[in-house]
């Protein structure tokens, strides 16, 4: 059924999850003129004139999902992905908002590139795209990028993702400078010299496979460093793709000390261990690498306890040619926008994560981490909503994949859970039932 | 074949234990007769049953002449021309010719002569070791259907067969009894 | 009654010692012993692989291993073709995948590959469905024929393959031969010790079933087989050891030490070594040394591997 955005929309029958209110119960939600007009007990809005009813029995309604870490590859690497195809993968995966990393070609280290990205996102008319600007010029770590210009152009955070900010002095300066407008540095933590030319986690497995491994310490050392720098500068740090138990311990203590840090974890780091690379399987090669069983448990515990704030995908599209090579030469990363929901729900099913916590980590917490507007299930807020069917079987394959690239270790796997509808400002931008996209011009 | 093969499964016996032993004795005598004695003679068996036959013939000759002739064994696995079409993994057991191949007259010994390809492979193996003065062939059973121009000098029994039949020799040392059997599919 | 041994299926590829069963190891060794005999004849050739094409794809420099494989192929009457790093299109930027497809279209029966990246032979084996792949050394991962020929040398000299105490001295970390030997000897149930400074003898080795010793004297005690692994000095800047002198002082193997700590032991050096630095000349040239046998046995083992992989694959091929 086609829903018209000029008529009221009554979403009934589903379980509404609002983590900030501790709510996980049957509620009806009324959407009028692109805004949430009311959330109340079932039946409360039955008398509303001319309302279209959208029955989501058996499904879950949440605020729109937000992914703080995706790579859209445009400008410069459009053969891997572009903003439009990335946005399609995002809304098909249930995301209303994504933040894209600046490691494009050219780097998003000035206002023009930021504006370009925002324009392309408007052209696509699907999910909201919030650019992340570079910390240093061309991400080379030598000169600070014009952070205020980037901020004013629309960047919501800064990152040199793919690289750490190697120089402690540069990181300090970046934190101090950005603190004058409350800027957030989303950092890729890796001591590159210690890590060397690695292609997987350092362990007995890397020894057996004859591959250079990156010890967890190379990640932990930089996290420790940046906690101290955040402490002395008062700046804000968001730790990208946290993958070790030790890192969770450090972040917990930092938060207890009142330092402004936040952290994200990627679904593959709480689903797979390093054994996924066992047959030199380049589909499982990524940065940070897949780690040990203990690390997987550690990050899940960290997520469940809220030490790790949110879940991001680090959607990193790569063409097949860059993965169909010798393991040590293969590119790092996997696509992830459409597998986040099923992989996260799997942990809920296994009892490792409550549904409330999982949804919070995908909705309220990422918004809070980057200071994004609190849209979604709030009366008066923009109706950015996601309907999730937790029992829907999902297989990432040629038919279902919206990304231009197919690099995923979950390709062809039977998963459970998918987005049913993705709604932005009351507009159904994606419907799984008809596998259709409906771009609007309301996204900005 | 493992264990005894009863008649009713399609196997019929064409030589019993006594016939086998008499043939071996006769062949031993014929070898001595044709070669006028034991001088420069060497017996070479083709693995696996050829080995046991060679041993028996050598013993018989020793009983007659008082001297045991030199005995060797050849493994044709490395010389076969049909291994790629076989689905079986080959087992290489080695060739041992403990005498000077260039000076001897070799009697090559095998249990069954069929297409002749095994004998050809054995000749190739022997010739890689040297140039014997002559090579004669002794077989316990000749089943016909030659594919190469190879003829035996000494034969225990001629058993004409067709291509879809199977011939098996069983020897005491290897199989626990002596006999030659033919299998005819129904 | 003559006991007939059973043949054991080997193949379709030999990518490493990992994945081989004890039966397969013994079968390869037994077959190799037959080829040792062939190599003593004046006509060192057998027609078994006549008409077969074997390609040596050596994308990492090597003289001894490549020559050994070439001789093995030729003694089996196969047609051996050498492609090395300098002459292949890989230098022009051709991907390994395209190199493999190009070679496959020439219908080789076996491709022997040496490559600087771990997992390269596995990658090629996944791509090619009609060709057997033999790993002649991939990155730091494995060098299976080397471990097998080392084992053959040990068997010939000591008359057994187990029980044995194997001690590996030197750069175990950056040695694929070490890894293959560790897997092989653990499969046989032998005790394996590595002797090296902590920078090289990472504690993860213990999870591979290996004992770690930092002192040479302590490690050598009671050894049956001592294997010297070349210290990769060309990478001194990686700072695993400060310099040659210090290394030699701590880890050089001499007749004196072996006589005192492991009097019955034999010594192997799978690969080039520095005389006087890792092994004393006296040791290399002396009666303990199996270094000379390693070369001969290399050809026999490689003949066995090529023979077994090419045979018994059933049905019409190429």
Image (cartoon, helix red, strand yellow):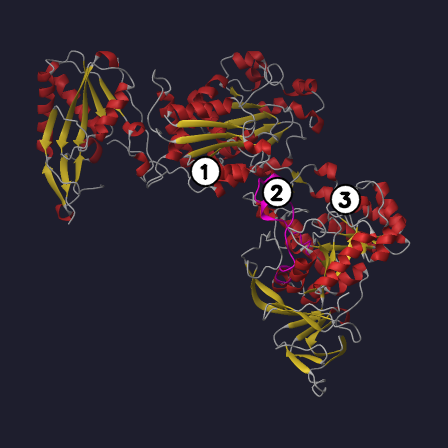
Judged from the image, the secondary structure of the residue bearing numbered disc 3 is: loop
Per the picture, the main secondary structure of the magenta-coloured stretch is: loop
Q: Which residues are magenta?
A: A313-342
Q: Earlier in the sequence, mark 3 or mark 2?
A: 3
Foreground: disc 1 or disc 2: 1
Residue position for label 1: C104
Q: Is residue A12 left or right of residue A21?
A: left
Mark pair 1, 3: CA separation: 43 Å
Q: Are marks 3 and 2 in contact (CB under 8 Å)?
A: no
**Dot 1 alpha-carbon crowd within 10 angstroms: few under 14, some 14 to 19, many 20 or more:** some
On the image, which quarter does residue B75 sit in? top left
Foreground: disc 3 or disc 2: 2
Judged from the image, the secondary structure of the residue bearing numbered disc 2 is: loop
Chain of the residue displaying label 2: A
Q: Nearer the viewer, residue A331 or A204?
A: A331
Asked if residue A249 is among those painted magenta in the image, a careful observer would answer: no
- Same chain for mark 3 and mark 2? The answer is yes
Residue position for label 2: A330
Residue position for label 3: A164
Q: Can residue A98 be seen in this snapshot?
A: no
Mark pair 1, 2: CA separation: 23 Å
Q: Position of residue C229 (x, y in %)?
A: 58, 24
């Amino acid at each position: 059924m086609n829903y018209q955005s000029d008529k009221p929309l009554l979403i009934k029958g589903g379980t509404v999850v609002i983590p900030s209110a501790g709510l996980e119960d049957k509620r009806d939600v009324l959407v009028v003129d692109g805004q949430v007009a009311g959330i109340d007990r079932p039946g409360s809005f039955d008398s509303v004139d001319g309302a279209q009813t959208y029955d989501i029995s058996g499904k879950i309604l949440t605020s729109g999902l937000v992914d703080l870490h995706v790579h859209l590859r445009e400008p410069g690497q459009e053969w891997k992905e572009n903003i439009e195809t990335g946005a399609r993968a995002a809304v098909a995966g249930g995301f209303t908002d994504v933040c894209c990393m600046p490691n494009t070609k050219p780097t998003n280290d000035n206002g023009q590139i930021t504006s370009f990205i925002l324009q392309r996102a408007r052209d696509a008319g699907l999910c909201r795209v919030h650019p992340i600007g570079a910390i240093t010029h061309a991400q080379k770590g030598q000169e600070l990028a014009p952070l205020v210009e980037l901020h004013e152009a629309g960047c919501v955070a800064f990152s040199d993702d793919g690289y750490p900010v190697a120089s402690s002095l540069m990181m300090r300066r970046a934190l101090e400078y950005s603190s004058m407008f409350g800027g957030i540095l989303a950092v890729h933590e890796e001591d590159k010299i210690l890590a060397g030319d690695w292609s997987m986690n350092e362990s007995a497995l890397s020894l057996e496979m004859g591959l250079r491994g990156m010890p967890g310490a190379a990640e932990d050392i930089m996290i420790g460093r940046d906690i101290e720098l955040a402490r002395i500068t008062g700046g804000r740090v968001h730790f990208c793709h946290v993958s070790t138990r030790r890192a969770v311990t450090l972040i917990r203590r930092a938060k207890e000390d009142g330092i402004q840090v936040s952290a994200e974890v990627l679904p593959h780091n709480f689903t797979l261990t390093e054994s996924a690379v066992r047959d030199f399987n380049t589909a499982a090669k990524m940065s940070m690498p897949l780690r040990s069983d203990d690390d997987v448990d550690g990050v899940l515990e960290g997520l469940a306890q809220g030490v790790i704030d949110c879940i991001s995908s680090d959607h990193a599209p790569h063409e097949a040619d860059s993965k169909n090579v010798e393991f040590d030469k293969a590119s790092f990363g996997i696509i992830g926008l459409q597998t986040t929901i099923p992989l996260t729900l799997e942990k809920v099913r296994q009892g490792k994560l409550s549904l409330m916590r999982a949804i919070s980590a995908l909705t309220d917490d990422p918004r809070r981490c980057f200071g994004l507007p609190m849209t979604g299930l709030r009366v008066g807020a923009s109706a950015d909503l996601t309907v999730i069917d937790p029992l829907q079987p999902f297989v990432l394959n040629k038919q279902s994949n919206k990304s231009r690239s197919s690099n995923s270790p979950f390709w062809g796997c039977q998963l459970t859970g998918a987005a049913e509808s993705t709604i932005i400002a009351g507009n159904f931008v994606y419907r799984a039932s008809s596998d259709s996209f409906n771009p609007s011009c309301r996204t900005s | 074949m493992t264990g005894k093969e009863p008649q009713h499964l399609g196997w019929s016996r064409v030589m019993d234990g006594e016939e086998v032993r008499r043939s071996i004795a006769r062949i031993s005598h014929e070898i001595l007769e044709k070669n006028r004695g034991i001088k420069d003679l060497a017996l070479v068996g083709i693995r696996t049953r050829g080995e046991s036959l060679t041993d028996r013939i050598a013993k018989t000759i020793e009983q007659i002449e008082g001297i045991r002739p030199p005995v060797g064994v050849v493994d044709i696995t490395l010389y076969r021309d049909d291994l790629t079409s076989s689905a079986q993994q080959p087992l290489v057991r080695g060739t041992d010719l403990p005498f000077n191949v260039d000076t001897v007259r070799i009697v090559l010994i095998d249990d069954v002569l069929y297409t002749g390809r095994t004998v050809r492979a054995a000749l190739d193996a022997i010739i890689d070791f040297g140039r014997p003065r002559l090579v004669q062939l002794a077989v316990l059973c000749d089943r016909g259907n030659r594919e190469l121009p190879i003829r035996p000098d000494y034969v225990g029994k001629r058993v004409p067969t067709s291509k879809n039949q199977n011939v098996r020799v069983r020897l005491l040392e290897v199989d626990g009894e002596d006999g030659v059997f033919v299998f005819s599919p129904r | 009654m003559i006991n007939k041994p059973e043949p054991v299926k080997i193949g379709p590829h030999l990518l490493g010692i990992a994945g081989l069963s004890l039966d397969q190891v013994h079968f390869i060794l037994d077959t190799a012993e037959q080829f040792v005999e062939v190599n003593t004849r004046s006509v060192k050739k057998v027609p078994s692989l006549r008409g077969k094409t074997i390609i040596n794809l050596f994308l990492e420099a090597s003289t001894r291993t490549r020559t050994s494989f070439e001789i093995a192929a030729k003694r089996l009457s196969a047609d051996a073709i050498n492609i090395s790093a300098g002459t292949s299109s890989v230098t022009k930027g051709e991907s390994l995948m395209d190199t493999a497809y190009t070679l496959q279209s020439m219908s080789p029966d076996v491709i022997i590959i040496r490559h600087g990246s771990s997992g390269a032979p596995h990658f090629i084996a996944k791509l090619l469905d009609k060709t057997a792949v033999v790993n002649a050394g991939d990155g730091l991962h494995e060098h299976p024929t080397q471990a097998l020929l080392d084992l053959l040398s040990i068997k010939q000299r000591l008359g057994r393959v187990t029980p044995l105490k194997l001690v590996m001295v030197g750069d175990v970390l950056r040695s694929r031969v070490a890894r293959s030997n560790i897997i092989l000897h653990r499969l046989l149930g032998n005790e394996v010790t590595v002797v090296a400074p902590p920078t090289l003898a990472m504690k993860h080795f213990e999870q591979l079933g290996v004992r770690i010793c930092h002192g040479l004297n302590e490690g050598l005690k009671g050894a049956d087989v001592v294997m010297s692994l070349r210290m990769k000095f060309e990478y001194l800047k990686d700072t695993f050891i400060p310099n040659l002198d210090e290394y030699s002082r701590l880890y050089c193997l001499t007749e004196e030490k072996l006589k005192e700590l492991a009097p019955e032991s034999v010594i192997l050096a799978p690969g080039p070594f520095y005389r006087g630095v890792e092994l004393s000349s006296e040791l290399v040239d002396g009666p303990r040394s199996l270094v000379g046998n390693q070369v001969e046995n290399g050809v026999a083992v490689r003949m066995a591997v090529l023979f077994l992989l090419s045979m018994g694959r059933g049905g019409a091929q190429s």
